[in-house]
Image (cartoon, rainbow, N blue to C red):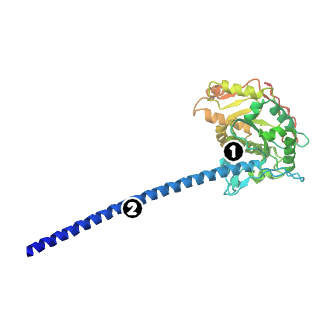
Amino acid sequence: MKAKNVNLLFAFVAVLLFGFSCFCISRINQTDNQLINCRNHVLEFTETVQRLKNKSESNHQNLVKVLHQMKHKAAHITKSSGNFLEKKVNILGQDETLPDHFEVLKYFLPHLRTAGKLYPAIATSQGRAGVSFALGIATINRGNHTYLKQTLSSVLSRMTPEEEDDSVVIVSVADTDKSYLKSVVRMVKTRFRKQVQSGVLEVISIPTLFYPQTLLDKKIIKSSESWKIKQVLDFCILMLYAQPKATYYLQLEDDIVAKKMYFTKMKDFINSLTSKDWFYIEFSVLGFIGKLFRSKDLTDFVQFFLMFYKTKPIDILLDDVFLLRMCSWGEPLRRCLQRKKEAQVQYRPSLFQHVGTQSSFPGREQYLKDHYY
């Protein structure tokens, strides 16, 4: 009897243990399922957060882009007092976004290292970019003599409508006299209203902050040496501004005229070149007039010009950078100069002629002419 009771007890215990085991296994499986579901929810939540983050960053970038475009497009309403500057963006707040390629100036101009983000002042612009050609014209006050209107008339009138759509002409006022800036803006908005509104013509101003204080001293600024130094900086700043706008950059001056169909001839000649290893193309033999560069190379040129801006005029520096980049160490100079014809391509006849007689240097007259024009 006792043995039978013991067997029944063991059987009962076994049933209980089996039932408890099944219960535990069920709970474990349920817990595992809950953990799996929880993990899936966490992954789904993480993915949702990441999507929201990406969308937020995208919206932020779009907002910054729109604000940047608005900075260029939203002009200050012209007042009767004659305030022509649409937007001053020469120094921006740290939270504002603009192209940072002007930061290169801080390496060579120590007085700018404590400044904020640098950018020229925009007098009038539609923010045109993504075109094939940017034409840069630096101008300063020549007193009673002015050639800028004639230059712009020649350059703009000899473009076809299609060529206008694929280019931007940038006038950079590099003069500390604000009245000259106002006169230039008034002139272009009156004489070239259509081109200003379409975006093919824009005017910028170089703030005095960009220049070392020594170049702004009234006694020094009239010296020939300081004039040449400032001119190099003027060209460098204009190049940096134009670089992101176009595939090619053409350097002009404010006292030239262009041949008829110059733009078409220039494009056709570039497309006809079988070698793409050219350093720059020369459409005029005079000084820095009519020199065409690939925009992607402008930073390298600007860095070299800034490195030696106190030593030589910019057209001489252009020859120096050619010798430095194209001539091998120990190579005879004659052999290097033979290759110059391939790298420094010359177009004849010249497409631009110098017409100014009153130099941008005060009191000096010059009668330089391009004999290949």
Q: Which residue is mark 2?
A: 34
Q: Which residue is mark 1?
A: 306
Q: Secondary structure at mark 2?
A: helix
Name the kind of residue labelled 1 in the image: Leu
Name the kind of residue labelled 2 in the image: Gln
Label 2 CA crowd tier, 10 Å (few <14, some 14–19, many 20+): few
> Which residue is found at the position 54% from the left and 53% from the top?
51
Q: Position of residue 290 (x, y in %)?
A: 75, 32
Q: Position of residue 162 (x, y in %)?
A: 75, 31
From this viewpoint, which residue is outermost toward the right?
144
Q: Give the position of the C terminus as an image quadrant.
A: top right
Label 1 CA crowd tier, 10 Å (few <14, some 14–19, many 20+): many
Mark 2 or mark 1, earlier in chain:
2
Q: Position of residue 72 (x, y in %)?
A: 75, 48
Q: In the image shown, does 41 or 358 lie closer to the viewer?
A: 41
Q: Nearer the viewer, mark 2 or mark 1?
A: 2
